[in-house]
Amino acid sequence: MIEAPKGTRDILPAEIGRWRFVEDRAHALFERYGFREIRTPLFERTELFARGIGEGSDIVAKEMYTFTDRKGRSLTLRPENTAPVARAFIEHGLYRGAGLQRLYYIGPMFRYERPQKGRMRQFHQIGVEVFGSDHPAVDAETLEMLMSFLRVLGIESAALRLNSVGDPVCRPSYREALLAYLKEQRNSMCEDCHRRIADNPLRCFDCKVPADRDIMARAPAIIDFLCAECRGHFDRLRSLLQALDIAHTVDPRLVRGLDYYRRTSFEVTLSGLGAQNALLGGGRYDGLIHDLGGPDVPGFGFAVGEERLVMSLPETAAVPSGAPEVVILALEEEGVVGALVLARALRRAGRRVVFEPQPGRSLKAQLRRAGDLEARFVLILGESEIREGAVAIKSMADGAQDRVPLERVEARLREMSGA
Ligand code: HAM
């Protein structure tokens, strides 16, 4: 048997209601804030990620699915979607109109990671990007939308951790202080961190080796090195969040695993997620569009891991079941045409109807099957019904049964549903 590749997973019909539930709410809520959906390709030229996310990041150094196509071009399955959306923004000149561009996306991403609970090689993100303003009100409003999204889904106990990672003005002096510290600690750190110290010392915060994490927990924190502008931006953001009652904590060592962040960076963690406790992450990336060859346009965004979101939904979430309202049973071959015609009429009236042609199978077996499908009503076309141009209606909830002429079926279903 050929199985799905390691780190990928089929999302089966029994689970799909939970996915549709979160996606439907994302579409509805984000659009209320002026966001519009964008769909970009699943693969891009490799250099987009190398330049956008950064060569020294774990994602680019170790986790990309990169291949050469038949013409020798290097392509990569997207490990994230901020760089692709920025690329599309530049390519289509979306910056030309005055004002902000608010975009969102839902779709698969690919990272070659060691799979575990909540960590996949193909996973899904629901993300948003705002281009065109560095005002902290953009950060505050987008974070407010994010927390509303989690609330609408019934996810409580989400903890927002916030930091500022500075900008090119303040980062050099921080980098020096960090390097000085890391040089003292180097001998007790892992090989990967040796590479990180040489390439980009900030990336040592990504290390998952426990001893190195202890070392990094004592490292100098960027927030103590912010320049006046970055400090002002951060303080204003915090006061706006307070005005909106958005609870958050400042985590001075929150440095995210992608190089494009400037100033605001944040994550939301959930205790129930275990080791992979980051439900989502994001921040400001004011230099990215420019670095990718576009104009000097600032940006801000976040991405939620959809697997982790779906896992965290409360049991009580009003997830659509996908069950049919009506199952039609034809007990005789002569009833098949009538069943098809009736199914079509009911579907035209907006009902979800299933017909499985199994004439000759016993009524009992067919009713059991309708029960498995969790149908509300069963319509039975047996010998006498066919003769009389009628149909038997059975309510699965209370077993009540009735017989009506074919043309009365829809009206009777409405009465029986109490509508
Ligand atoms: P990220 O922190 O790399 O940020 O990913 C965001 C979220 O995607 C994570 O918090 C996690 O929930 C989910 N995720 C990441 N890797 C995996 C995986 N292997 N399996 C399951 N879920 C995963 C970004 O991707 C940025 N582009 C976010 C952003 C948007 N920043 C600004 N705009």
Image (cartoon, rainbow, N blue to C red):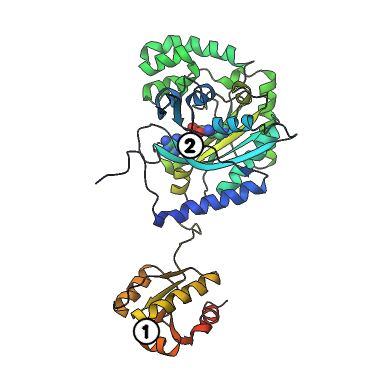
The residue nearer to you, when weighing 108 against 397, is: 108
Q: Rounded to the nearest whole Å, what is the CA distance between mark 1 and mark 2? A: 51 Å
Residue 278: tell me if it is visible.
no
75 left or right, relative to 419: left
Image coords of residue 133 (percent x, y)? 70, 31
Q: Earlier in the sequence, mark 1 or mark 2?
A: 2
Q: Quadrant of the C terminus?
A: bottom right
Q: Amino acid at mark 2?
A: Leu
What is the secondary structure assignment of the residue under circle 2?
loop
Residue in view at x 44 percent, y 9 percent: 183
What is the secondary structure assignment of the residue under circle 1?
loop
Q: Which residue is mark 1?
A: 382
Image coords of residue 208 (percent x, y)? 39, 26
Relative to 369, is 156 above or below? above
Q: Which residue is mark 2?
A: 42
Image coords of residue 144 (percent x, y)? 64, 42
Residue 228: tell me if it is visible.
yes
The residue nearer to you, when weighing 191 against 2, is: 2
Q: Amino acid at mark 1?
A: Gly
Residue in view at x 35 percent, y 36 percent: 115
